[in-house]
Amino acid sequence: MEIFYIEIPFDWKKYRLKVEVLFKDNKMEQYKVSSTKGFITLESNRPYLRSKGLKHKPPNWNVIDGRMSNVHLKELIIKTLMDIIEK
C-alpha cells in the first residue's frame, strides 16, 4: 500500500494529511485521507478517463466513507491530490 503526505493551506494554517492508496485499477481509484481528527475515503474515475484519452475532462470524485462538512476544504484536498497524482 502506497502512503504519501499532502499539505493543505486552509484558514491561515497548513494541515498535513496522510494519504493511503487503497485501490487502483484501470477504471477507478480510492484514496484514504487521514488527519488527527478523522478520515475520508475518496473515489474517482480518473484512470478510466485517462485510458480513453480524455485528459482534460475532470474526474468525478465521491466521498464513499467518512464525512466532510466543509465543501471548500474537500475541494482543496481533491485539487492537491490531483496535482500530485497527475505528475
Image (cartoon, rainbow, N blue to C red):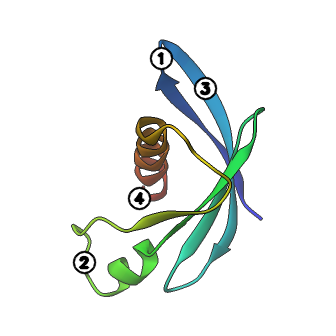
Look at mark 1 in the image and give the residue it sits on. 11
Q: Judge the density around disc 1: few (<14), some (14-19), many (≥20) Cα neighbours within 10 Å.
A: few
Q: Amino acid at mark 4?
A: Glu
Q: Judge the density around disc 4: few (<14), some (14-19), many (≥20) Cα neighbours within 10 Å.
A: few
Q: Quadrant of residue 76?
A: top left
Would you place residue 56 above or below residue 37 in this image?
below
Q: Quadrant of the N terminus?
A: bottom right
Q: Amino acid at mark 3?
A: Tyr
Nearer to us of marks 3 and 1 is 1
Task: Kindly identify which numbered label has been placed on residue 54.
Answer: 2
SS category of the residue bearing label 4? loop
The residues bearing labels 4 and 2 have C-alpha atoms spaced at a distance of 13 Å
Q: Earlier in the sequence, mark 4 or mark 2?
A: 2
Task: Kindly identify which numbered label has been placed on residue 15.
Answer: 3
The residues bearing labels 1 and 4 have C-alpha atoms spaced at a distance of 26 Å
Residue 46 position, x and y percent, is 41, 72
Instruction: Name the residue at 21% across, 67% down.
Output: 56
The residues bearing labels 1 and 2 have C-alpha atoms spaced at a distance of 34 Å
Q: Earlier in the sequence, mark 1 or mark 4?
A: 1
Q: Earlier in the sequence, mark 3 or mark 4?
A: 3
Look at mark 4 in the image and give the residue it sits on. 86
Q: Judge the density around disc 3: few (<14), some (14-19), many (≥20) Cα neighbours within 10 Å.
A: some
Instruction: Name the residue at 56% across, 31% down.
Output: 7
